[in-house]
Amino acid sequence: MGRNGTLKLVTGNSNLSLAEAIAENLGCPLTPRIAKPFSDGEIRIEIGDNVRGSDVFVIQSTCKPVNDNLIELCLMLDALKRASAKRITAVVPYYGYARQDRKVIPRVPISAKMVADFISVAGASRLLTIDLHAGQIQGFFDIPVDNLYASKVLLEYLKELDGEKVVVSPDAGGMERARAFAKKLDCGLAIIDKRRDKPNQAEAMHVIGDVRSKLAIIVDDMVDTAGTLMTAVDALLENGAKRVIACASHPVLSGPAVERIAKSNIEKLIVTDTIPLTKEARECGKIEVVSVAALIAQAINNIHNESSVSVLFT
């Protein structure tokens, strides 16, 4: 038993396989619970074990169906708060609504802030997440936030690849991430100059940096419709890249994403299991998954035992 009571793990329905892998890494069983809809669509939550005085970690990505998973998370947090859990940590490997983090036009919400309020008010004492789309979202919370980096597991995969490498950022906003990858891989850096004309559509203009005859590694925090990714792949090959692979923390893969990837000239897309793959994505031979279960389990263990989480950032 830790300083904050007995460690308990509770999961919603968004990513059961990841929750089970985290539990296995910790050697701690998942707490029984009921999380299913009533006939009218309202969600029924019931925690099936005593959590009074416990240190509870609720594992739930707010991925598709985003709103159902978000409400399920909030209801579980409320149930645990009312059951007198000593501390409740929301473990949200993929934080939905993160791209709506500011007002880009008049009369729109800052949805990332509103979701942060939902989670805090529902009962979370802290948040544990992976690769927030914008790091400043941590400031939307009035509770501690631990933002882990999936680069730790992605780099282990990338270091095993043969050939002269160059890390590529698909846009200017991803340069900090790409630079960190390039430093760890001790290789060159390039960037795709693009112009976005409509939401979920992007046109790659040209490549800044030397990619000729190299293995180009595109790094991003998520792949949604894969439009940006595919134009980046074509631009790199047109500029002489020998091979192109990509890696991303969050496989959102909405709309035509999987079809685009399957038909593209990309060699491989490496993603993590913060979001479970659809059947179509699992059957796509170009998509490969590395797990963040051990990383999250270590963070949970460190939080529970009041030891440093920052050691996992290196």
Image (cartoon, helix red, strand yellow):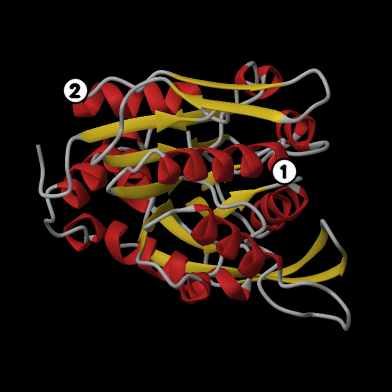
Residue 246 visible, this angle: no
Residue 16 visible, this angle: yes
* Amino acid on which the number 2 mark rests in the picture: Gly
Q: Where is residue 41 in the image (x, y as percent from the top left)?
A: 79, 27
Which numbered circle lies on residue 312?
A: none
The residue wearing badge 1 is 67
Q: Quadrant of residue 232?
A: bottom right
Q: Which residue lies furthest to the bottom in this view?
A: 106
* Residue drawn at 43 percent across, 52 percent down: 130
**x and y, in percent, of residue 266 in the image:** 64, 39
Q: How crowded is mark 2: few (under 14 residues within 10 Å), some or many (20 or more)?
A: few
Disc 2 vs disc 1: Cβ atoms closer than 8 Å?
no
Judging from the image, what secondary structure is the residue with disc 2 in? loop
Residue 251 place in picture, x, y as percent: 60, 40
Q: Which residue is drawn at 51% across and 25% down?
A: 46
Q: Earlier in the sequence, mark 2 or mark 1?
A: 2
Which mark identifies residue 27?
2
Quadrant of residue 262 within the rendered picture: top right
Indicate the amino acid at tag 1: Asn
* Residues packed near mark 1 inside 10 Å, few (<14), some (14 to 19) or many (20 plus): few
Q: Residue at x 81, y 61 (%)?
A: 202
Decide which of 211, 160 is in the foreground and name it: 160
Q: In this view, does 314 lie to the left or right of 20?
A: left
Residue 87's place in the image compared with 58, above or below, is below
Q: Is residue 33 above or below residue 143?
A: above
Mark 1 falls on what kind of element? Answer: helix
Quadrant for the C terminus in the image: bottom left
